[in-house]
């Protein structure tokens, strides 16, 4: 079963992140070589993601509620889902 976070995303630096899941356990791999990082997904009103970034501090993100296919992270960054428009 996939999560709303599965797929390819682009961060504010232009790096592509590929997220895959098995059940609610996620793996994120950056195109620039960072990762893989593991995390979990849950739905608490909106989809929520927690990633254990082993080269930085763990982060929590929420899926934007406006249907814009963005993850808004607690470290003030964003990921935009590829193929979801501008």
Image: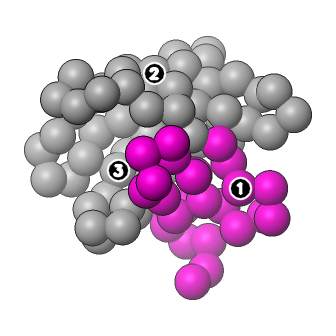
Q: Position of residue 36 (x, y in %)?
A: 25, 29
Looking at the image, the residue that sits furthest to the left is 33
Q: Which residues are magenta?
A: 62-86
Give the vertical position of 28 relative to 9 (above or below).
Answer: above
Which of the marked residues, 3 or 1, is nearer the chain's N terminus? 3
Q: Label 2, on which residue?
A: 39
Q: Nearer the viewer, residue 84 or 41?
A: 41
Residue drawn at x 12%, y 44% as measured from the top left: 33
Q: Label 1, on which residue?
A: 64
Which of the marked residues, 3 or 2, is nearer the chain's N terminus? 3
Which of the marked residues, 2 or 1, is nearer the chain's N terminus? 2
Query: Mark 3 to mark 1: distance in Å?
Result: 17 Å
Q: How is the image coloured?
A: one colour
Q: Label 3, on which residue?
A: 17
Q: Check disc 3 and report its element: helix, strand or loop.
A: strand
Disc nearest the viewer among 3 and 1: 1
Q: Quadrant of the C terminus?
A: bottom right
Residue 26 can be seen in this image:
no
Give the vertical position of 70 relative to 53 (above or below).
Answer: below
């Amino acid at each position: 079963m996939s999560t709303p976070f599965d797929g390819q995303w682009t961060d504010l630096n232009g790096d592509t992140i590929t997220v895959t899941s098995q059940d609610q356990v996620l793996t994120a791999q950056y195109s620039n070589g960072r990762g893989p990082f593991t995390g979990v997904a849950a739905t608490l009103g909106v989809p929520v993601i927690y990633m254990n970034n082993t080269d930085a501090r763990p982060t929590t993100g929420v899926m934007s509620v406006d249907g814009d296919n963005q993850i808004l992270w607690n470290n003030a960054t964003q990921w935009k889902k590829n193929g979801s428009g501008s």
